[in-house]
């Protein structure tokens, strides 16, 4: 499948729960300030910016597949790009890094990657022994109400779009990929938005971007509206998969 482009400006303008998930995930990293940290699915660079503050003598490797997201990141970090390696790459493939990193962080990205066993092997292959991997993403049970609404309007409920993994399978895959000290949990974390325009913009930009890509422009708003009409309220019923592990 072709990589999805994101509307980076619309994305950044939204009241994203990612703005809490990012700092909470970065805070789980134990850093001295000298490390090289890989941000997997870095988006517009919000978390990379925060990482740079914790890495006065370190650097960030920012990887994403979306050109628009990376352009916005380069704007945001324009005065610090000497400490940022920006890499456009498909996370379904081996990571094209020149040197190993000391830690890996990932926010709201893993559920876009269909094969987690392979992804964790790829992460392990660029992470130094003893290096930390912390991540959060949509997990098993994520956006169940939205998927039911998609089914109700005869649309793709997303089994081929998202990979909402559970705790046991994630733990098994991390062990097999070479991680120890594995902690995995699923945490319901619904996000309530303002009804109407804000909720519809959020769904269009963040949750239903892959669905809308295949539709003519004139059909996009009616599609989002049809989903909203089948939901009990302006809530995205997020369930987050939180991961912490150390490379053996
Ligand atoms: C919901 S955004 C999260 C971005 C950022 N971490 C944040 O919290 O705002 C998901 C990101 O994953 C990236 N992504 C999804 N699938 C990808 C793939 N196969 N290869 C590379 N990047 C991918 C998207 O381009 C997007 O920037």
Image: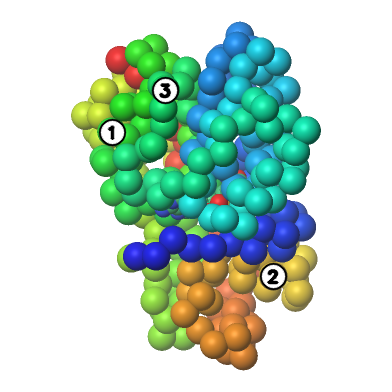
Q: Earlier in the sequence, mark 3 or mark 2?
A: 3
Q: Position of residue 174 (x, y in %)?
A: 30, 30
| Outermost left residue | 176
Which residue has dot 1 on it?
121
Q: Are marks 1 and 2 in contact (CB under 8 Å)?
A: no
Give the label, 1 or 2, closer to the camera: 1
Where is 145 relative to 223, above or below?
Answer: above
The residue shown at (62%, 40%) is 21
Which residue has dot 3 on it?
99
Inter-mark Cα distance, 3 to 1: 16 Å
Q: Within 10 Å of the Cα at label 3, are there few (<14), some (14-19), or many (20+) other Cα atoms?
A: few
User: Left or right: 63 with respect to 220?
Assistant: left
Q: Are marks 3 and 2 in contact (CB under 8 Å)?
A: no
User: Left or right: 13 with respect to 111?
Assistant: right
Inter-mark Cα distance, 1 to 2: 35 Å
Q: Nearer the viewer, residue 146 or 45?
A: 45
- Secondary structure beneath dot 3 equals loop
Which residue has dot 2 on it?
201
The residue shown at (75%, 75%) is 196
Give the label, 3 or 1, closer to the camera: 3
- Secondary structure beneath dot 1 equals helix
Q: Position of residue 105 (x, y in %)?
A: 51, 31
Q: Nearer the viewer, residue 235 or 212?
A: 212
Where is 60 relative to 220, above or below?
Answer: above
Q: Within 10 Å of the Cα at label 2, are there few (<14), some (14-19), or many (20+) other Cα atoms?
A: some
Q: Position of residue 7 (x, y in %)?
A: 64, 63
Q: Within 10 Å of the Cα at label 1, are there few (<14), some (14-19), or many (20+) other Cα atoms?
A: some
Quarter of the image holding residue 208? bottom right
The residue shown at (45%, 41%) is 241
| Outermost top residue | 32
């Amino acid at each position: 499948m072709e990589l999805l482009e994101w509307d980076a400006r619309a994305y950044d303008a939204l009241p994203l729960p990612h703005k809490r998930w990012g700092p909470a995930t970065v805070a789980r990293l134990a850093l001295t300030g000298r490390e090289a940290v890989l941000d997997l699915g870095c988006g517009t660079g919000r978390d990379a910016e925060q990482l740079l503050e914790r890495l006065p003598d370190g650097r960030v490797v920012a990887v994403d597949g979306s050109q628009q997201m990376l352009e916005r990141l380069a704007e945001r970090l324009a005065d610090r790009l000497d400490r940022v390696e920006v890499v456009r790459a498909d996370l379904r493939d081996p990571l094209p890094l020149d040197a190993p990193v000391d830690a890996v962080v990932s926010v709201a990205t893993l559920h876009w990657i269909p094969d987690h066993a392979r992804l964790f092997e790829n992460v392990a292959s660029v992470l130094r022994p003893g290096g930390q991997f912390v991540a959060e993403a949509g997990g098993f049970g994520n956006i169940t109400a939205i998927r039911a609404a998609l089914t109700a309007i005869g649309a793709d409920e997303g089994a081929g779009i998202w990979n909402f993994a559970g705790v046991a399978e994630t733990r098994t895959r991390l062990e097999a990929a070479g991680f120890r000290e594995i902690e995995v949990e699923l945490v319901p974390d619904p996000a309530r938005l303002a009804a109407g325009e804000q909720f519809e913009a959020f769904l269009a930009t963040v949750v239903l971007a892959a669905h809308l890509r295949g539709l003519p422009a004139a059909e996009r708003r009616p599609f989002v509206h049809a989903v909203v009409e089948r939901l009990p309220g302006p809530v995205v019923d997020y369930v987050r998969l939180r991961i912490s592990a150390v490379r053996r």
